[in-house]
Image (cartoon, rainbow, N blue to C red):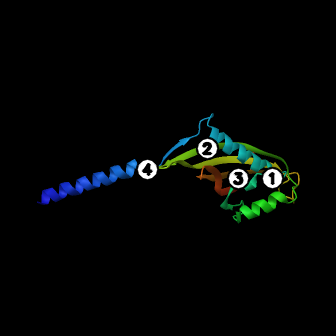
Amino acid sequence: MRHRILQLMCLITCVVVLMTTAHAQQSHWATPDDKTAKFMIDMERKWAEGVCANNGVIAELLADDFQGTGTGGERYNKADELRDEKGPHSAHGCALDDAKVRFFSSSSGEDVAIIYGSEHAIGKDKTHPDAKQCQVWTDTWLERDGKWQIAAAQDNKVDCK
């Protein structure tokens, strides 16, 4: 009897491990020709360039429930970004330097992507109008109702190379 209970427990453990492995989230880096990744990187480029001029990208780019963390640790949301987009722009030379897309899939398909990127702008810091400011960031994209948008962002100021 004791032997049977031990066998049953081993069987249950194996089934749980296999089920957990089968439902584990899979991920992969985007290929250079991936149309969704190209769209996302283009939108990230527009957001980076939007620091210099209002290009109207924010309304489509950010989810309504978007939350970001700025380089000083402050939180910001979509309304804050829309207000900044429409405000005066003192920066110039804004550009996306790099962006890499990693897709994550669930049982419903690929619906999460993380983009790791970097950008720069000159004069973004109004107290140093000629200084180049560089950032690295991580943006979390979600696909909802067939539409990809950024739901979260984390920005970090770094020394320019």
Ranked by sequence position, the earlier of labels 4 and 2 is 4
Which numbered disc, 3 or 2, marks the residue closer to the eye?
3
Q: Residue at x 28, y 55 (%)?
A: 13
- Give the mark nearest the N terminus, 1 or 3: 1
Q: Which residue is mark 2?
A: 101
Can you say which quadrant of the picture contains the N terminus?
bottom left
The quadrant the C terminus occupies is top right
From the image, tell me which residue sits under label 1. Answer: 51
Against 23, is 66 above or below?
A: below
Q: Say which of marks 3 and 4 sits in front.
A: 3
Residue hosting label 4: 24
Q: Nearer the viewer, residue 120 or 12?
A: 12
Q: Which residue is mark 3?
A: 61
Q: Is 156 or 25 nearer to us in this picture?
A: 25
Residue 26's label in the rendered image is none
Q: Are marks 4 and 2 in contact (CB under 8 Å)?
A: no
